[in-house]
Image (spheres, rainbow, N blue to C red):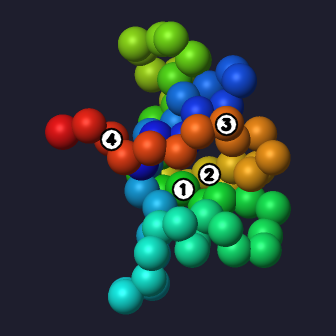
């Protein structure tokens, strides 16, 4: 998944319970979206700034969520 904020593009895995939907996971009543195997880029940047096993992204900062293109 790609999460886009005003400053960063994060690519990683969002985990969904079996039989669940991604939209339901994102819309849960919590302030953060957990992302695993995350790579952090500057918006518009090609070179990774960091790679992390886990990061919790504040939902109020997210402006877009999209699947990674294959």
Give the class, few, some or many, for how many residues have Cα within 10 Å of label 1's Cα (few <14, many ≥20). Answer: many
Numbered marks: total: 4
Gap between marks 1 and 4, in whole Å?
Answer: 14 Å
Answer yes or no: do the residues labelled 1 and 2 have beta carbons within 8 Å? Answer: yes
SS type, badge 1: strand
User: On the picture, is 13 further left or further right than 30?
Assistant: left
Asked if the residue at tag 4 contacts the one at tag 3, i.e. Cβ–Cβ closer than 8 Å, the answer is: no
| Dot 3: element | loop
Whichever of callouts 1 and 2 sits on the residue coming sooner in the sequence is 1
The reply to whether dot 2 and dot 4 touch (C-beta < 8 Å) is no
Residue annotated with mark 4: 68
> Residue at horizontal 52%, vertical 23%?
41
Q: Does label 3 or label 2 sit earlier along the sequence? A: 2
> Residue furthest toward the left?
70
The CA span between labels 3 and 4 is 16 Å
Along the line of sight, the residue nearer the viewer: 54 or 14: 14
- Closer to the observer: label 3 or label 4? 3
Q: Which residue is mark 1?
A: 35
């Amino acid at each position: 998944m790609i999460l886009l904020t005003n400053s960063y593009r994060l690519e990683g895995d969002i985990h969904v319970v079996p039989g669940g939907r991604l939209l339901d996971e994102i819309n849960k009543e919590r302030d953060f979206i957990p992302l695993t195997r995350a790579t952090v880029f500057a918006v518009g940047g090609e070179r990774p700034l960091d790679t992390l096993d886990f990061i919790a992204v504040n939902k109020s900062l997210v402006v877009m969520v999209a699947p990674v293109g294959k």
